Image: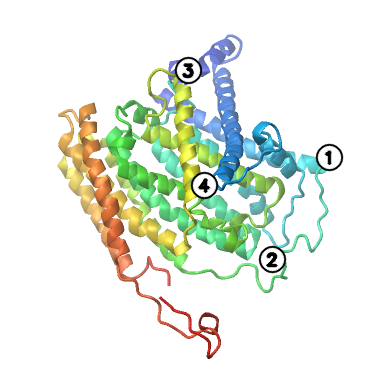
Amino acid sequence: MDPRGFFELNTWYRGLYLTLDNVLPSWMSYFIAGFAVMFAIVNAMMLLATLYIWFERRALGRFQVRQGPNRWGPFGLLQPIADALKILGKEDIVPHGADRWVFNIAPIVMFFPVPMIVAVLPIAKNVAITDINVGLLFVVAITGFSTLAIFMAGWASGNRYALFGAARAVAMLISYEIPLIITLGSIALLSGSLAMGTIVATQNVPYLLVQPLAFVIFMMAISAEMNRSPFDIVEAESELIAGYHTEYSGMKFGMFMLAEFAAVIVASGLATTIFLQGWRWPFLPSAIWFLLKMGMFVFLFLWIRATIPRLRVDQILAFAWKFLLPLSVVSLFATALEVFFLREPDGSLTTNTLWIMSGINFGLAIVALVGWANVLGHRRYNPAPRIASMYRDGPLGSRPVEVQ
Amino acid sequence: MVDDYLRQYGLIMIYSGIAIMIPATMLILSFALRLVGVRPHKPSPVKSSLYECGVTPIGRQYLQFNFRYYIFGLLFVAFDVVVVFLYPWATQFSNLGGFALITIAVFMSILLLGWVYAWRKGALEWE
C-alpha cells in the first residue's frame, strides 16, 4: 500500500506506521496506526470534556455570584472525577414497563455522534483523523443521531414526562436543522468544497467576518442542536422533571450528561474550523491555536447559557421557522449573488474580494437582523378569546385579573 | 486516487468502531461493577415503577401527545430535501453560470411559497 495519502491526512500516523511496517503487513500497520492515533484523539477530547464540566460549573458559579465546586483538589478540579466515581456506584434502575433493549441502547446512540464529528475536524496543521470530501454533509448527517437517541430514550422509558420531552426534542431539533443546513450551504459556496481541510485552506479571511449573519444563525442553531440553554426545553426541569432522561440513573444518566458536555467541545471545534480559520494563525503551534480558539467558543457558549433565560416551546419553534429560516435563505442568496458578481474569471475568490464581501455582509447582517426582528415584533398580537375561569379570574366578587 | 478515497472511509469505519466502543465500555464497566458487588442491584416493585412525582401512574404509559409536532415534522421533510440540491450546487457554484443561480432560486422560491402558505394557515402558531 502506498502510504503517502495516509500521511497527508495526518502526519501523526507516520512514525507508528513506518515502525510497524517493518514487521507487520501494511494493512495491519494502517489499522493499528490509525486506531492508536484516533484513540489518543478521542481520549484527549474526553479529557477536555471532563475539564469542561469543571469549568462550566465553576464559571457558572461565578456568573451567579457563588463559589461553585471547590472541595476536591485545587479549585475543585477533581470534582468531575468524584462525580464519575459516585455515578458508577449508583444503582442502575430500569423502570417497569420500559422497552429494555431500546432503553439500554439509547445512551450509546446518544454518545456516538459526539466523537464522530471530531473525525472530520482538522485539529492541527496536517492533522485530521480523516478529511473526507463531504465533511460538512457528514457533520449534518451525524448530528441527526442525537435526535434519534433522544426519541429512543424518551419513548423506551415509558414515562410521560420523558415522552413529552422527547416529542419536544424531536420537533425542536428538526426545526433547527433547517437553518443550520442552509447556513452551512453559504459556507460551502465560499469555499467551493465540503471538505473541512479545504474550508480551512481557502479561509484567507475568517468566515466569521465574511459571513456574520451565517455565524449568528449557526451559533443559535447549534446551541439548539445541543439542547443548551436558552434552548433546553428538552429537559426543562421546572416543567418536565428531567425530560427524556427522567428514568435514567447511574452510568446511563452519566453518559447522557457526558455526551451533552462533550458536544459543547465538539461544537466549539466545529465553529473554530468553519468560522475562525481552524488551526491557522501565526506564531504559535497550530494545535495550540486550535485549542485557544476552541476555548473562546466554549466560553461563548457558556456565557450564552448563563445570560439568556429559557424560552417556551412555541417561542422556540416559531423562532426557528419565522426568524432563522428566512434569514438563512437571505444569507445564502446574498452570498451566491456576491460570489456570482465578484468572482475571478476562473471562479476563485481573492482575499480582497473576501474583504469586500465582509463589508457588504456586515451591513446586510445588521439590516436583516434588526429589520426582520422589528417586522416580527410589531405584528399585531391576537390573544385567544377570553373565557371566564375561576383560576384566572378568582372567585365571584373578587377583583378580576387583567388579561393583556 | 480511488485508493486514497477508500482509505479515508476505511479510517471512518475504524473510528466509528471506537466511537461505539467507548460508550459500550462504560456500560460494560457499570455492569461489571454490579457483578463484583460494588454497585447495588436490589430491584423492587416500588423502585421500578414509573416516576411521576410520587403519584401512582394511572392508565396507559404511551399516551397521546400534541399533533402539532407532526406538522413540524412534515415541514421538515419538505425542507430537508433542500440539502440534496443545495450542497452540490453550492460547491460547484463558482464554476457554474447564472443559469444555476436562477434554477436554485426558482427551487427555493417554490419551497418558500410552501413555507408562506404554512405560515398563513397558522401551522407555525401554537394555540
Q: Which residue is drawn at the image coordinates 33% and 32% (left, top)?
A: A206
Label 4: how many Cα within 10 Å (few below 14, some 14–19, many 20+): some
Give how far apart the Cα atoms at labels 3 and 2 are. 55 Å
Give how far apart the Cα atoms at labels 1 and 2 are. 32 Å
Q: Report if residue A226 is visible in the image.
A: no
Label 3: how many Cα within 10 Å (few below 14, some 14–19, many 20+): some
- Tell me which corner region of the image, top left, top right, bottom left or bottom right, holds residue B115: bottom left
Residue A393 position (above or below residue B5): below
Q: Subunit of mark 3? A: A
Amino acid tagged 1: Val
Q: Secondary structure at mark 1?
A: helix
Reading the chain from its start, which is encountered first: label 4 or label 3?
3
Q: Which residue is mark 2?
A: B53
Amino acid tagged 3: Thr
Q: Subunit of mark 4? A: A
Q: Which residue is mark 4?
A: A145
Quarter occupied by the N terminus of chain B: top left
Quarter occupied by the C terminus of chain B: bottom left
Q: Give the label on residue B36, or none.
A: 1
